[in-house]
Amino acid sequence: MPQKTVPFTKTGIGKLPNNKPVIYRIQTEDGRNNYTGVAKRGRVYNRLVEHLPKGCDPVPGTKVMVQQVDSIAEAKQREQAIIQRSQPRYNINGKGKLIP
């Protein structure tokens, strides 16, 4: 599936594809994964804006990598595998634990 990396800014995320569900990774300058999430088709830009510094769910990062997938179910399955493998610092549930 297509993959793209852009700066983690409104301008950068405005250049991302929006026609399929995506798995996204908010990364540090050195490429460390700070957060992995899923966005539905048509909601990629809005979901990522929520993670910008002034958004409702901010996550620090300098770039975002997205990978398009065919379905939201596939995206969620891959998201869980990535979270278990890389244990991103900001993927926590309400109790402060990493999402299983």
Image (tube, rainbow, N blue to C red):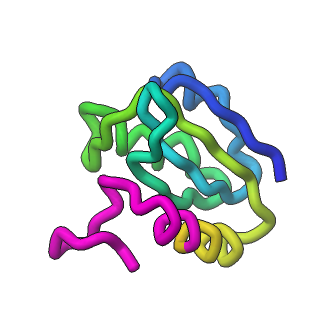
Residue range of the region highlighted in magenta in the rendering: 81-100
Q: Position of residue 84 (x, y in %)?
A: 48, 71
Identify which residue, 29 or 55, lies in the foreground. 29
2 displayed left or right of 32: right
For image coordinates 19% across by 72% down, the residue present is 94
Pick the front one: 86 or 65: 86
Residue 96: x and y, percent?
18, 69
Residue at the limit of the structure toward the top, as seen here: 11
Q: Camera-side residue: 58 or 63?
A: 63
Q: Residue at x 80, y 65 (%)?
A: 70
Vertical arrangement, residue 32 with respect to residue 9, above or below: below
Is 94 in front, or is 16? 94
Task: Tell me residue 92's x, y (percent).
Answer: 28, 65
* Left or right of 41, for residue 82: left
Per the image, is 94 magenta? yes
Residue 29, given in percent of the width and then of the height, sits at 44, 26
How many numbered discs? 0
From the viewer's perspective, tell me whether residue 86 is left or right of residue 22: left
In the displayed structure, would residue 70 be above or below residue 95? above
- Can you name the residue that lies furthest to the left here? 95
Q: Residue at x 71, y 36 (%)?
A: 4
Seen from this angle, which residue lies furthest right? 1
Task: Report the quarter where the C terminus lies.
Answer: bottom left
The residue at 36%/74% (across/down) is 99
| Residue 97, image quadrant | bottom left
